[in-house]
Image: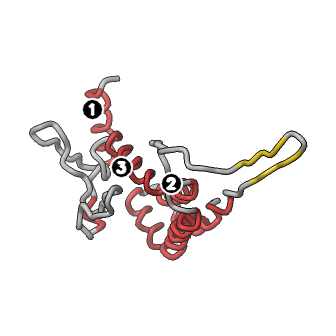
Amino acid sequence: MNETTIRTLVEEVLTELGKSRVSPTANGHRPSANNGIPVMSAANGHLKSQISDFKSQSGSDGVFDSVDAAVAAANEAFQQLCLKPIADRAKLVQIVKDLCEQNAEVWGRAELEETKIGRLDHKIEKLKIIKLVPGTEYLKTDAWSGDGGITLEEYAPFGVIGAITPVTHSLPTLAGNVVNMVAAG
């Protein structure tokens, strides 16, 4: 499959779903699709976009113009996150869990209205149980010693995780992934 075939397929799917596609600019690249999403530079923490109207993002296909751009930003963030102590990562994980719990009904309703997929009670419950997703508490160091020496098992970050997967409950899936990945570093 070449890029043109994939682009055509995506266009057809988006048309079928009733979404409008952002047209490429004269140079063939899509304009930045971060409308409505404040985007922070992972490198310096400066706000790159100051658009606060969440609903204005409808019709955009995401924050990044390409998978490569997303991976590059994720790698920058990883370089910072892996230097943080587990206690800092635990705080970040708790923030995500608390936000999911506090906003479960609003976010569940918004997701159902946008996707028209699933049941509201399922979406709300899946956001509420994010608090049960394993976090930093699973990163325990183990050590064994004996006549042959000592073995130390300690968890450490290993790099960027990139995945594109279809989901029917996107917010709970993303929140659960954030908890796991931030906890891991």
Q: Which residue is mark 1?
A: 8
Where is residue 85 drawn, in percent x and y? 55, 62
Compute the Cα span from label 2 to label 3.
Answer: 14 Å
> Amino acid under label 1?
Thr
Q: How is the image coloured?
A: secondary structure
Residue at the farthest top position? 1
**Vertically, is 126 above or below 31?**
below
Of labels 2 and 3, earlier in sequence is 3
Q: Nearer the viewer, mark 2 or mark 3?
A: 2
Residue 159's disc number: none
Q: Around disc 1, counting alpha carbons within 10 Å, would you say few (fewer than 14), some (14 to 19), or many (20 or more)? A: few
Compute the Cα span from label 1 to label 2.
Answer: 39 Å
CB contact under 8 Å: marks 2 and 3: no
Of labels 1 and 2, earlier in sequence is 1
Where is residue 9 drawn, in percent x and y? 32, 33
Q: Around disc 2, counting alpha carbons within 10 Å, would you say few (fewer than 14), some (14 to 19), or many (20 or more)? A: some
Q: Which residue is mark 3?
A: 73
Q: Around disc 3, counting alpha carbons within 10 Å, would you say few (fewer than 14), some (14 to 19), or many (20 or more)? A: some
One can see residue 118 in this view: no
Callout 3 secondary element: helix
Q: Which residue is mark 2?
A: 82
Callout 1 secondary element: helix
Compute the Cα span from label 1 to label 3.
Answer: 27 Å
Q: Nearer the viewer, residue 102 or 49?
A: 49
Residue at the farthest left position? 26
Where is residue 64 drawn, in percent x and y? 30, 48
**Vertically, is 140 above or below 131?**
above
